[in-house]
Image: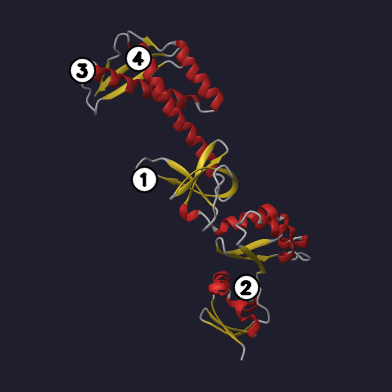
Amino acid sequence: MDIRKLPKTEFAAAVAQIAGERNIDPQEILDAIEAGLVSAYRRDQKERGTIVAEEAVFEVELSPETGSFAIFEINGDKKTEVTPPGFGRIAAMTAKQVIDQKIHEVERDTIISEYEQKIGSLVLGVALRSDPYKITVGIAKTEGICPKDEQIRNEIIALGSKKLFLIKEIQSDEVTGRKDIILSRRDPEFIKQLFIREVPEVGNRTVTIEKVARDAGQRTKVAVFSTQKGIDPVGSCIGQKGSRIQSVLNELPTEEKVDVVAYSKNQNQFIINALSPAENVEIISLKDGVAEVQVPEDQLALAIGSGGENVRLAGILTDIDIKVSAKK
């Protein structure tokens, strides 16, 4: 049988560079080389004026030790070698282009797999490119995408600046099959992860974040709880002289305020806490998921908030429709 050879330097360089330096399974490299040889063969035949049917099936026998190969056409039980004479040089050039692309895909898939294990955590990224629909962010060895609807409204991220992002999900394009790492600064989970990062008691779970209600860029309410005696969950998150909450705020636009409130299993008490910073809140009635609440006249603006934001977020936090009025 007439076995052709890829130039040994080409073969060795491809395997050594990709398997050794990029830590990719050698078998994936061999599969990519075989696919490259078939692609090169089809192109070569077309240039020679021979049309190869799309449905034609080919098989490559490739020696992983030497780089020796032969191309066979499979027709039922019949296997016919079709390796053209002098194909080695063409194969080396054409296959290398295909191999490089295949390896790039394999390498990206490996990176994507790593980030699948990191969904829900924070990553430091550099803003690389921006368009009306997304920001492309450099993260370690790859890039992620922060779509418009995952950005904080009115926050301007300058190109080249570093920001923390939540790794929200891995999204597959239905047409190309390409997988993208989707990042977010808008998701409420972003706030939770900031507290885990900045507050040791949240990180070690002596303080738990029960729920986050957020209007990104404007206001956020965080309900915290602790079953451990002697631990003040709100105080733990605020920190001495506000040091811990300030570390959280430093990662947010200056306009965004964060209220840390105590979670309570008692719904009435939780509603009162959630309406912070309003004081002297009185629950008039609580029935069928609707709470009638009264506050002193001088607390009404605080309880409702600008544009109704405070009472709305308190409602999201407690899962209660809260109606606020002034005490008569």
Label 1 Cα crowd, 10 Å radius (few <14 / some 14-19 / many 20+): few
Return the disc, 1 or 4, that comes first in the chain's sequence. 4
Q: CA distance from mark 3 to mark 2?
A: 76 Å
Contact (Cβ within 8 Å) of mark 1 with mark 2: no
Crowd tier of the residue under label 3, counting other residues whose Cα lies within 10 Å: few below 14, some 14–19, many 20 or above: few
Count all numbered tags in the image, as a single digit: 4
Say above or below: 244 vs 69.
below
Give the structural element (helix, strand or loop) at label 2.
helix
Which one is in front, 55 or 12?
12
Residue 170 position within the rendered picture, expressed as x and y whole percent measured from the top left: 48, 46
Amino acid on which disc 4 is placed: Ile
Gap between marks 1 and 4 measured at Cα: 34 Å
On the question of residue 315 being in view, the answer is no
| Among numbered discs 1 and 2, the one appearing first in the sequence | 1
- In the picture, measured across the screen, residue 53 lies left or right of residue 323, that is left
Residue 153, how many percent across, how many down? Answer: 51, 58
